Image (cartoon, rainbow, N blue to C red):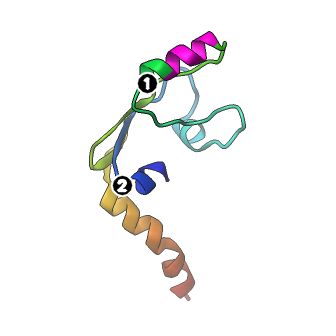
Amino acid sequence: EMALAGRTGLTLAQPADTGPAHAYWFGEDQGRYLAATTDSNAVLAAAEAAGIEATLLGAAGSDALTVDGFDPISIAELRQIHEAWLPDYMAAP
């Protein structure tokens, strides 16, 4: 959703020992948040100073969503799929 809203791609890598990819990337617990920033070093330093665990997961700026270990998908294709699923679902018999 952030990539679609920002109209930019992402390259992401899942940290080691964090479980199955689907659970890590799509789990919606209240213990994790994703933040986009232009100064990751400052965010990581502030988190460390506050005693908050923080991990750099990747970088923005391409035309595709690329998650380590999976084939990339273009943002244009992802947008089309995202915006068409409900009309397609409602049109199905």
Location of residue 20 (image quadrant): top right
Which residue is the site of mark 2? 7
Which residue corresponds to the image point at 40% horizontal and 52% vertical from the top-left?
6
Which residue corresponds to the image point at 54% horizontal and 40% vertical from the top-left?
25
In the image, which disc is placed on residue 70?
none
Of residue 6 and residue 53, the one placed in the foreground of this image is: 6
67 up-or-down from 57: above or below: below
Identify residue type, mark 2.
Arg
Of residue 33 and residue 42, the one placed in the foreground of this image is: 42
Looking at the magenta stretch, what is its main secondary structure? helix
Mark 1 vs 2, N-terminal side? 2
Which residue corresponds to the image point at 30% horizontal and 48% vertical from the top-left?
64
Mark 1, Cα crowd under 10 Å, few <14 / some 14-19 / many 20+, is: some
Task: Point out the stretch of residues depicted in magenta.
Answer: 43-49
Residue 51, position in %: x, y? 66, 12
Residue 32, position in %: x, y? 64, 33
Identify residue type, mark 1.
Ser
Location of residue 34 (image quadrant): top right
